[in-house]
Image (cartoon, grey):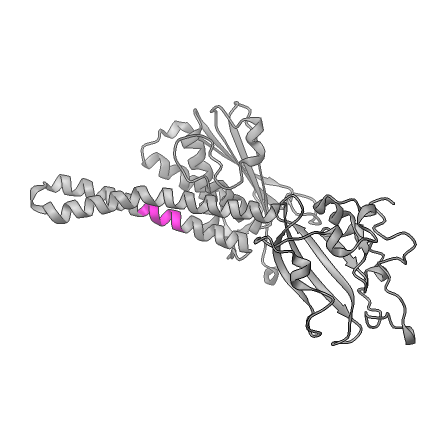
Amino acid sequence: MSVGTGRAPGARDARRPPAGRGGHAEGYGAPRPDDPAELGIDPDDLPDGLVIADEHGRIICFNAAAARISAVPADQALGQPLEKALPLEDLEGRRWWQLTDPYGGLAIRVGQPERNLLLHGGREVLVSAKYVRAHPTGPVRRVVVSLRDTEARRRTERSHAELIATVAHELRSPLTSVKGFTATLLAKWERFTDDQKRLMLETVDADADRVTRLIAELLDISRIDSGRLEVRRQPIDMGAAVGRHVQAYVAAGQPADRFLVRVEQPLPELWADPDKIDQVLSNLVENAVRHGEGSVTIDVTPAPSPREGDDAGNTATSVTVSDEGPGIPEESMNRVFTRFWRGSKRGGTGLGLYIVKGIVEAHGGTITVGRARGGGAEIRFSLPVGTPAHLL
């Protein structure tokens, strides 16, 4: 018996419940339009493990995902008692099938909620069960068990732990500085000159800005992860927006000849959230200035829409920011837009490009990273025109 079949030898197809009197499936109720058998869905097509035991507790369906997760071949599990094929224990070492007693106990029980259990060998899985009865208080006719791997959840938990550790680290330094300078000024105000007081207050102000920026990044991450990032579209002149960011860097002391801005006209009329686009441009230009070398080139050009199904032609605006630094190693290309990725040890939380990607995608756009002609890093994002429906 191959893993793909997932049925006991000689047993009826576990995907099709037995017909009862009056054309009803015994223990299942009337056939429904979403019945997997009616839709032609094989148990092996399901992403989660599916195990079904009959009224005697013997397994009649054991799909490919269940075999993969439990490391038990289907041909060994089929026909076996449920507790033998899946010897599950809770985290305290108690045998789960004896503890829950699916075929005994209260007749009003309908199943078991999802929980972490251990397979033989200590492998942790997520398990839930459904008890199928012919009528609400009748005997259990089927036990349907769902198995899920815990690896995805563990990755999420590790990501959350890394986020907490990063935030704690990033907050500690500016808050320590703020506390130290304010305590010193309050205790020894008269001992400092006006210039010294101004320097300390400017440091406090800069550190407060750093904390505010970090909190804003965390809020953005929360909205991106939950799909609640709002986009308030307005007409945007992308060329002018890029020019403002370059002028700000020049005013802050960067040489004007370090920047090359090229805007290809005519650009399509672009509707986007101006504050969020400013956030994207700020991150990309700052990365090029901080981590790159030589000239920073910013190209603004019309481009085909990144969305499938849009009309052909230049229905998007593309912005490419490139530098002449060492660039991004090939092995790191696929991690650039993940959380906590840092291109160098020159500071930063490693959250900026993750947020940039979230903002661009919230506009229906795309963003890519590559190597510039001059050898440095090149990041390019494209935004569809995005004209509001009421203006079309």
Q: Quadrant of residue 139?
A: bottom right
Name the residue at the left extreme: 190
Q: Position of residue 218 (x, y in %)?
A: 44, 50
**Which quadrant is home to the C terminus?**
bottom right
User: Residue drawn 42% across and 43% down?
Assistant: 166
User: Residue drawn 40% across and 32% down?
Assistant: 290
Q: Quadrant of residue 101?
A: bottom right
Whether residue 272 appears in this view of the structure is: no
**155 on left or right of 295:** right
**Which quadrant is home to the N terminus?**
top right
Magenta segment: 209-215
Magenta span: helix, strand or loop, mainly?
A: helix
14 or 299, nearer to the observer: 14
Residue 2 versus residue 389 in the image, above or below = above
Q: Position of residue 170 (x, y in %)?
A: 37, 42
**360 on left or right of 2:** left
